[in-house]
Image: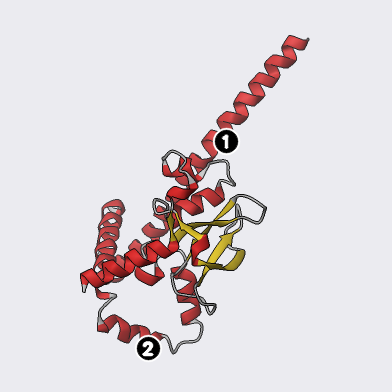
Amino acid sequence: MQEKKTLIKHFIENMLQGLFWLLPIAAVVFILLWVYDKLDAITLKIFSSFGFDIDGQSFIWITLSVIALALTLYILGFIIHTKLAFLFEALFAKIPFYSTLKDIINIFNSSKKGETKVLVVAIKGFGVTGYNIGLMYSQKESVIKDHYTVTLSQSPIPNGGFMFEIHKKDILVIQSATFDNNLQYLLSMGVKSLAEILKIEPVAIDKFTPLEEWLDKRGKDVKTRK
């Protein structure tokens, strides 16, 4: 009887492991199929309005549309720093809530540079010892001299958290980490360590770059480019 219970328990445990292994794959496939279905409907409507019949060839037209969109966004990436882009942004800035929406969306932009670059940092933890891993969404100095804003996000839902004004000597930059790496770390609730996500060996705390040193180096790089 005991052996039968053991076999049933073994079967259930393996079945659950199989289920939780399959769930992320099934979720990704579901999302991809949903996106494809939406793109198919949008593409059909757009091309049909111009008199094109794409029945039976929707995959080819969707692929071409995605490629065209990617190239358009690539070109816009160059234009964004020109006076034309600033003119359009100045016009849209007059629309209520535009600036707020822009700032919220930019939070998730890990390709930002300069003073708006997102840094993954370590600061002294809440306890007597240890550190917390947080984000610096920009490197603009706080209203308090020599202090900078560090955000500690909640886990596993990172749309909340706490903001701290930290002295630059107490901020260490984790240069190998990105916003996306930190997001993955938060979503895992610590099941995956940041070292595991970055695929590196754990690093001694004194090997990380102090923010003050990072800012000095960035300033020198800017002067060199000029």
Circle 2 sits in a helix, a strand or a loop, which is it?
Answer: helix
- Is residue 56 placed above or below 191 in the rendered structure? below
Which residue lies at the image location 61% right of the left edge and 53% below the top edge? 155
Circle 1 sits in a helix, a strand or a loop, which is it?
Answer: helix
Residue 195, x across and y down, in percent = 47, 42
State the CA–CA distance, disc 1 to disc 2: 49 Å
Label 1 CA crowd tier, 10 Å (few <14, some 14–19, many 20+): few
* Residue 75 location, quadrant: bottom left
Q: Amino acid at mark 2?
A: Leu
Which residue lies at the image location 31% right of the left edge and 71% below the top edge? 49
Of residues 216 and 199, which is closer to you in this image?
Answer: 216
Of residues 127 and 115, which is closer to you in this image?
Answer: 127
Which residue lies at the image location 35% right of the left edge and 66% below the top edge? 216
- Residue under label 1: 20
Q: Is residue 109 visible?
A: no
Q: Is residue 139 visible?
A: yes
Q: Is residue 124 left or right of residue 101?
A: right
Q: Amino acid at mark 1?
A: Phe
- Residue under label 2: 91
Which residue lies at the image location 35% right of the left edge and 69% below the top edge? 114
